[in-house]
Amino acid sequence: MKSGLLADLEVFQQFAVPTPVTIRTCTAGDLPNLEWFGMFAAHREIIQAAYERQEQGENVMLVADVHGWAVGQLWIDLAKKVEQSTGILWALRVFPFLRNLRIGTRLIKVAEQVLRDRGFDCAEIGAEKDDPAARRLYERLGYRLVGSERSEYSYTGPDGVPVHVPVDEWILHKRLVRGRTGRTPVKEMCLAKLQEEH
């Protein structure tokens, strides 16, 4: 005889809800939503800095939009390794109850197309060593291990307290095959900007 909460649970109906998802660039109006009801409020400074770099043409912030709400994100650093013709994919995340629905995969594929359209030859992504599922996903999508890297990032939380976070991750690369787009590659624009600054 069943007892406890499971015995009292009655399922009256089960159905699927079709939900359109749009992958687009982040706008200023998305920034508060990217804190996800406080889950990433401590990262407010990082989110704002990434958006400012997008405004400067050094970063692209992709969001997966469901009815105006950013339920997933992936950012693309266009500047850090531009001289190696490599764009860096980072800050990939999907809202917990929408994981395993291929939203992350779609974000990665769109990011790769963004890099192709801008003349990049390679995409790079990091997988933290304590997250083997992430590495398996990237390898299924054609990324290959090229090394590992230890680093640290810092930010100041909303309470004014500085935070230092160590990162130990695998580095994976994927070669990009691109066609002609007729657009001025951002790779060349970034290189020109670096030359002007120096």
Image (cartoon, rainbow, N blue to C red):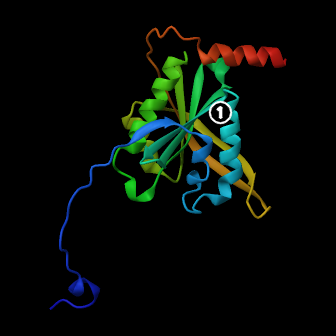
Is residue 137 among the parts visible in the rendering? no
Q: Which quadrant would the C terminus be assigned to in this image? A: top right
> Does residue 180 appear in the picture of this structure?
yes
Counting labels gives 1
Q: Is residue 60 left or right of residue 11?
A: right
Q: Position of residue 119 (x, y in %)?
A: 54, 15
Quarter of the figure with the N terminus = bottom left
Q: Position of residue 45 (x, y in %)?
A: 71, 50
Dot 1 falls on a residue whose secondary structure is helix
Q: Residue furthest right?
A: 198
Residue 22 drawn above or below residue 131: above
Residue in view at x 73 percent, y 13 percent:
192
- Residue placed most toward the observer, 24 or 138: 24
Residue positioned 59% across, 46% down in the render? 29
| Drawn side of residue 21 relative to residue 93, left or right | left
In this rendering, the answer to whether 58 lies above or below 15 is above
The image quarter in which residue 124 lies: top right
Task: From the image, tell me which residue sits under label 1.
Answer: 54
Q: Is residue 158 above or below residue 152?
A: below
Of residue 158 and residue 156, the one placed in the foreground of this image is 158
157 to 50, vertically: above or below: below
Q: Nearer the viewer, residue 166 or 198?
A: 198
**Spot occupied by residue 159 in the image (x, y as percentages of width and height):** 76, 64
**Residue 53 percent across, percent down from the top left:** 69, 34
